[in-house]
């Protein structure tokens, strides 16, 4: 019976990991595309940079804080969502860039 329990836990954990999804957010002409994204805890935002210059996406949100630093053209950076909530992502280089994130 113990083995069944271990197996069950393994299966549940595997299915949880398989459920984690990637949500691509590109940066084009100093704009996040899309400019809003809704996802779940454990999912990833995959930041792309299609501009011919660097970006630096970050958020000050306490629960999901991140700062991906200088992101070069063509570079992909994955950020895992850690906690539920709504917050803004901005670019440290281009203050007009705004991405609205909702984590459920
Ligand atoms: Cu930027």
Image: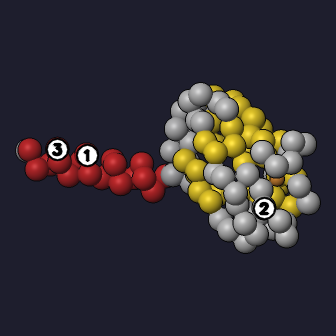
Marks 2 and 3 in Cβ contact (< 8 Å): no
Is disc 1 placed on a helix, strand or loop?
A: helix
- Measuring from the top left, give residue 93's x and y in whole percent: 82, 49
For image coordinates 73% across by 71% down, the residue present is 74
Left-right relation of 32 to 86: right
Closer to the camera in the image, 45 or 50: 50
Foreground tag (2 vs 3): 2
Q: What number is the disc on residue 9?
A: 1
x and y, in percent, of residue 83 in the image? 54, 33
Image point (87%, 53%), residue name: 31
Give the answer, above or below, for where 46 lies relative to 1. below
Q: In this view, does 60 lie to the left or right of 83?
A: right
Residue 71: mark in rendering: none
Q: Is residue 39 above or below residue 54?
A: above
Answer yes or no: disc 2 within 8 Å of ligand 1.
Answer: yes
Say which residue label 2 marks: 54
The structure's colour scheme is: secondary structure
Question: Disc 3, disc 1: CB below 8 Å?
Answer: yes
Nearer the observer: mark 2 or 1; the answer is 2
Disc 3 designates what residue?
5
Q: Residue 57 at what x, y percent from top left?
A: 72, 48
Mark 3 is surrounded, within 10 Å at the Cα level, by few (under 14), some (14 to 19) or many (20 or more) other residues, namely: few
Sequence-earlier tag: 2 or 3: 3
- Observer-nearest residue: 22 or 60? 60
- Mark 2 to mark 1 CA distance (whole Å): 43 Å
Q: Quadrant of the C terminus?
A: top right
């Amino acid at each position: 019976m113990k083995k069944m329990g271990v197996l069950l836990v393994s299966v549940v954990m595997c299915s949880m990991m398989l459920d984690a999804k990637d949500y691509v957010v590109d940066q084009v002409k100093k704009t996040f595309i899309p400019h809003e994204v809704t996802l779940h805890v454990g999912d990833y935002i995959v930041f792309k940079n299609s501009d011919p210059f660097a970006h630096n996406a970050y958020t000050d949100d306490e629960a999901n804080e991140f700062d991906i630093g200088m992101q070069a053209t063509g570079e992909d950076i994955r950020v895992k969502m850690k906690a539920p909530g709504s917050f803004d992502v901005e670019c440290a280089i281009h203050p007009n860039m705004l991405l609205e994130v909702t984590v459920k």
